Image (spheres, helix red, strand yellow):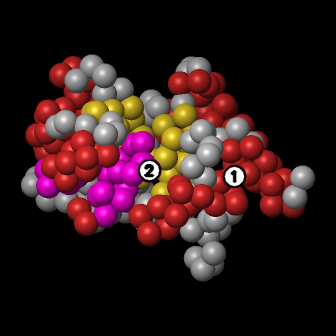
Amino acid sequence: MTDRKAQLAANLAQVEERITSACAVAGRKREEVTLIVVTKTYPASDVRMLHELGVRHVAENRDQDAAPKATACADLSLTWHFVGQLQTNKVRSVTSYADVVQSIDRIKLVTALSAAAVRAERELGCLIQVALDAESGERGERGGVAPDGIEELAAAVDAAEGLRLDGLMTVAPLAGPFAGRQRAAFDRLMEFATRLRAGHPAATMVSAGMSADLEDAVAAGATHVRVGTAVLGVRPGLG
């Protein structure tokens, strides 16, 4: 086993342990939580090693990095999640490899994704990104729609050809009433998710939590956690 693969295996084992014990504390089954490894800035060779180590869900946030990586790993059985803010001019490319887009935050994006999915004859899973720091009608600092815009977007995704409404996503906000209060932020997201499921029963996915706060996300009820640094190490160039 190469040094890099051994390092990834050790990191994965630690993250697995954290998720398992967080589930135990929350009285949840381990299989209720899916680990998505955020592979942004890391090479396709790392994605291959992660696949060998049992990872099946990976996430990227920039199309220019993700597209060649997804092509290089096209022979692997992976589910690709796009988690970054998405410009409409990148939609056609993202639709060619992403299985789930977790950053739906405006109608214009829904329309563009739908057209691209139909053209590519693909069905794309969609999560509405909720910005807990956004005022009514505004978008969040890190993307996302204000909570009062969830239902309108959900209806648009639901009605759009080629798209499937899978649920909600959030990033713990750095500002506003939930800054530094990850658990409260994730609890609030779960309230919105419960409300969404009342009208859209198949939208069961709740993506929340990252390396630093995955325990809070599991405790709140998240179905998917997005972990990068804790698996892959500190990103190059980010100190």
Earlier in the chain: of badge 2 and badge 1, it is 1
Q: Is residue 227 visible?
A: no
Task: Check residue 48 in the rendering and tell me which mark sits there, or answer none.
Answer: 1
Give the image location of residue 89, x and y in percent. Answer: 25, 66
Residue type, numbered disc 2:
Tyr
Q: In percent of the image, x 43 and y 65: which residue is there?
A: 62
**Is 160 left, or right, of 87 in this rendering?**
left
The picture quadrant where one finds residue 176 is bottom left
Q: In percent of the image, x 61 and y 33: which residue is there?
A: 22
Q: Is residue 41 visible?
A: yes
Magenta span of residues: 90-109
Task: Check residue 97 in the rendering and tell me which mark sits there, or answer none.
Answer: 2
Q: In percent of the image, x 53 and y 55: which residue is there?
A: 70
Looking at the image, is 186 positioned above or below residue 40? Answer: above
The picture quadrant where one finds residue 147 is top left
The picture quadrant where one finds residue 19 is top right
Crowd rating for badge 2 (residues with CA inside 10 Å; few <14, some 14–19, many 20+) = many
- Nearer to us in this view, 35 or 132: 35
Q: Quadrant of the C terminus?
A: bottom right
Residue 112 magenta-highlighted: no
Tell me the CA gap for discs 2 and 1. 16 Å
Give the image location of residue 108, x and y in percent. Answer: 14, 55
Give the image location of residue 168, x and y in percent. Answer: 32, 39
**Is 231 left, or right, of 215 in this rendering?**
right
Which residue is situated farthest in the right direction here? 1
**Is 112 left, or right, of 166 in this rendering?**
left
